[in-house]
Image (spheres, helix red, strand yellow):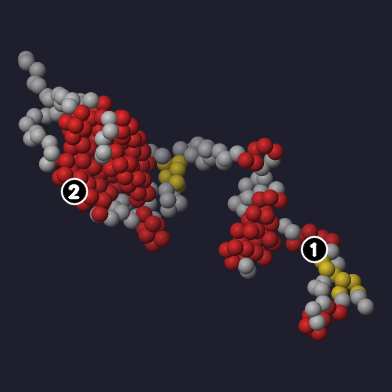
Amino acid sequence: MARRRCGVVRRWGDSERGRREGRRPPRVRGRRRRRLRRPGGMLRRAAGGGLRGLLAAGRRWQHSGAGSPDGDPPARGPRSDRAPKIYTRTGDAGFSSTFTGERRPKGDQIFEALGATDELSSAIGLAGEFSSEKGHTFVEQLHKVQCMLQDVGSNIATPLSSARGAHLKRTYFSEKPVLELEQWIDSYSEQLPPLRAFILPSGGKSSAALHFSRAVCRRAERCVVPLVQAGEADPNVAKYLNRLSDYLFVLARYAAMKEGKEEKIYIKPEP
């Protein structure tokens, strides 16, 4: 015998004895059934199944056309396979966010330093391409430097005044990369002829591009030093940029020497 109550057909299987005997659970009908199929309910039920359950629920949600778990609208038609748009419009008012969530003007010293660091990585990338064409073995070092500059940027984008413990743990910049640069500098310096005059950026494309990178590095350092002095960035970041400019100078000379290119020196013009 069964009776209907609140859209649920109640049967003998609902009782304790029925569950012990393996009877079927109650059927859910109408509006309540549709409500359980909503994405939010799906994720709540999946949470009890751990990470695997959440991942499976996310996949079902995406396939259902209900949109993403982040609240994005559903993709339609052929646009469903497209990547997210690059622009966000969140900086149109002249403000941007730090890693700690602060909204600061784009002219803030932090973003000046981040921009200079980005330019430095781009300049080193160009120098690396020129050097790769000449078969220089130090190209791998330049790639490693570019990766380290990403970590430099992470530290700069995390002002210490608003950083929490989790932020500091993820963006900590140690002294180890600084010591590695010093080892590289000493290694190349031992192979170069003594420096007896001021050298102008020259010595072939590889060397000139490395000199240009050195100049950009000096500017990046000048942008970071005020942040370090204000207690907003790690001192090792400024040390790294300082050693990096020395490394790029020595490497520019080394590239010119290996390619057999002449380094132009400063000659004081006659009055």
Q: Residue at x 28, y 33 (%)?
A: 135
User: Relative to residue 54, is residue 13 depicted above or below?
Assistant: below
| Left-right relation of 193 to 182 | left
SS under mark 1: helix
Q: Residue at x 65, y 41 (%)?
A: 80
Q: Residue at x 21, y 37 (%)?
A: 251
| Left-right relation of 8 to 154 | right
Where is residue 101? Give x, y as percent. 45, 51
Q: CA distance from mark 1 to mark 2?
A: 69 Å
Residue at far front of view: 135
> For the image shown, how many numbered marks are present on the structure?
2
Residue at far top of view: 271
Judging by the rendered image, the residue that carries numbered circle 1 is: 32
Mark sitting on residue 183 = 2
Q: Residue at x 67, y 45 (%)?
A: 74
Out of 54 and 165, give the one closest to the viewer.
54
Alpha-carbon neighbours of circle 2 within 10 Å: few (<14), some, or many (≥20)? Answer: few
SS under mark 2: helix
Alpha-carbon neighbours of circle 1 within 10 Å: few (<14), some, or many (≥20)? Answer: few
| Left-right relation of 240 to 165 | left
User: Relative to residue 195, is residue 169 depicted above or below?
Assistant: below
**Which one is in front in this view, the residue at disc 1 or the one at disc 2?**
2
| Residue 17 in view | yes
Out of 19 and 104, give the one closest to the viewer.
19
Three-letter amino acid code at disc 1? Arg
Three-letter amino acid code at disc 2? Gln
Q: Quadrant of residue 130?
A: top left
Where is residue 255? Give x, y as percent. 21, 32
